Amino acid sequence: MRRAWVLSSGWWHRAAAGVRGVRSREPRSFGTPPRCLLVTLLLGGCLSLNPAFDGDGGVTSGAESTTTTASVSTGAAAPSESASGTPGSASDSGTPTEGSTVGVSDTGNDTDPGPGCDDGVQNGGELGVDCGGPCGPTCEDGQDCVVDGDCLSQFCLDGTCTPDEFAAGSLIIPMDTDYQDLGMLEAYGVVYALLSAGVPVHWIIAPDKPYGGVDVVASAIDLQSGQPIDAHGYRGGPFVVSAADAVDALAVIEGWQQQNPATAVHEVSASFMAPVSRRLVAAPTIAMFADGNQDIARKYMMAAKIPDSTGDVTWPDSSPDMLDPLEVAGPTDSEHRDGALFDADGDPVYCQLMSMHWGVSDAEALPEVVAEVREFLGEPTHFFAECQAVSAFENLASHGLFLTTQGLLTGGGSNEHEFHGLDRPFAQFDGAFESVGGSEPAYKLPAGGTYKADGLVMITEQGSPVGVNDVWTTGTLDGMCAREDPGCTIGKVSYLGGHEYDVATPISDNPSSQGTRLFLNSLFEAPCSAASGTPDLTLSKSAPAHVAAPQITFTIDYANVGIATAHAAVLRDVLPGGSSFVAATQGGQLVGDTVTWSLGNLGPGENGSVSVTVDLGGAGVYENVAHLDYMAGLNAFGLDSNVTMTSYP
């Protein structure tokens, strides 16, 4: 059984702030401005709306009730990613080449983030010059901070922005060719296995690093050989498991290495500081589009040994996660959330969808597929397209144009490249990069066409400005949020040129396998894999402090105040000892001594209230607590309510 995680203290507690409120469920359509965009327009930045756990267990004393109106929360939606640009801006914080802003339009994303945030003066509640407070997570290491959310590193230690510290005994999964040349693709598989087992993983990426740049320097010992590693400069975005989680991680890693000995893992021998880009807490749910070329995605996934939701690493066409065009389109072309990407309430049931070579003519014949994917991207999800699938989705004027104003044209192939935004999770690789051929090896903007935001393109032809021969591109739907904004609630879109990349290793001898690395990077960019993209649930219970008659009615309130859907939610209430069941509202069923409510999927803003009434067996104090189980990605999470205490007589 997977372990349940309740992220309510430590870093998670410090990172979140605010007042919690429960929103009623409202019908959603793409035409309604998303929460991310609304906050951007009002405050000049797409900030996290997730408040902190109150930390007191939700229990107060009082004459009428033993409970407080505040809810116990998982707190799982605290920001965890480093924001790489100014809030409210779509600018790239990497090192673009000259001319890299060619073909970029202003779509409202360059909203001034607030008074004083770009004036070179510390004012207006800022924690440093133009950083923190109303300016959002923009303070660099060494600058003052109050909460983690003030810092680019997302880590505020003793009032100073600081990279995260990892103690001796932490584990590093190297992602450079020095130590992971043979096991590079399988390394993603072990990360997926760790997340599936409930072990958090930290993705270490140095801000503003150059091509081939070092992310962190650390000393360690290779787990398999015992070879000491002295002050190695880890590159390519290594993954780190903290010492506190090492015991659980080793149980997974040892089994993995028995089957996959090429996968290297190092045990840290001395503490080190590292810039954490993403804190991964859940294995993403993945859907593969059966577009006739699913063998390409299947090959990539099998090389990494990442399974479907049933645990099948072969990804057969019979997999429940293999969706054909009609399944994605759904039964109607008027309701764009009735396909297999959504549940009956219109909430997404996957974090990630990929299409490898869907035809342009196929999209024109069945435009509802593109319409459903556009709605899917209105949520914190991710869509990956490769080769002709890029044109099929992007160029469909009626529902496409996810990243551009007028679509994309096919560019020319080249193996001389320039790299941008190398501090982005999407752009992590080490060594030479080689493109592959196909009908669409690269993309260019048509005359008059633009990208909807700046900083989207990560790999271009050498010497060509952005918008001429672009190989690897990613951004949020319609450019609605700043690049890598941890509070964004809008889906991400990624486009890769080239028909089919290789999966051969060692990577240093097979640079055409790097495209597969980019594909695998995007799996862990699926927002639901990070703490900031998991559901944030509240659960509170109330009951009278005293009763004169031998009967109590308990009321249980629940809500999802996060940005992602909680799947398969089940609420349980064990009857107090000495009591007997009378009735439950909302279809609650008694099995043994436990009343159970199957709540289904709880989308953002969904909430409800149930109650259970019991007869009391005699005088005494009756304690009671409710429990809520749910899934985020493929992981099980759990949450207890506050404890109520009722005396009789």
Image (cartoon, rainbow, N blue to C red):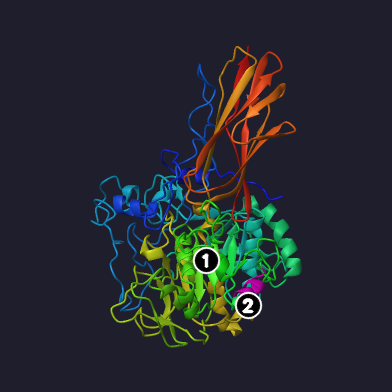
- Which quadrant of the view contains residue 543? top right
For the residue labelled by badge 1, is the local secondary structure a helix, a strand or a loop? helix
For the residue labelled by badge 2, is the local secondary structure a helix, a strand or a loop? helix
- The image shows residue 10 at horizontal and vertical percentages of 53, 43
- C-alpha gap between disc 1 and disc 2: 21 Å
- Which quadrant of the view contains residue 646? top right
Of the two numbered discs 1 and 2 on the same chain, state the one appearing first in sequence. 2
Residue wearing tag 2: 295
Residue wearing tag 1: 329
Write the start and end of the magenta stretch as one range.
297-305
Pointers 1 and 2 in contact (C-beta within 8 Å): no
Left or right: residue 560 compared with residue 179: left
Q: Nearer the viewer, residue 555 or 225?
A: 555
Give amino acid for label 2. Answer: Asp
Looking at the picture, does residue 78 appear above or below residue 259?
A: above
- The image shows residue 265 at horizontal and vertical percentages of 66, 65
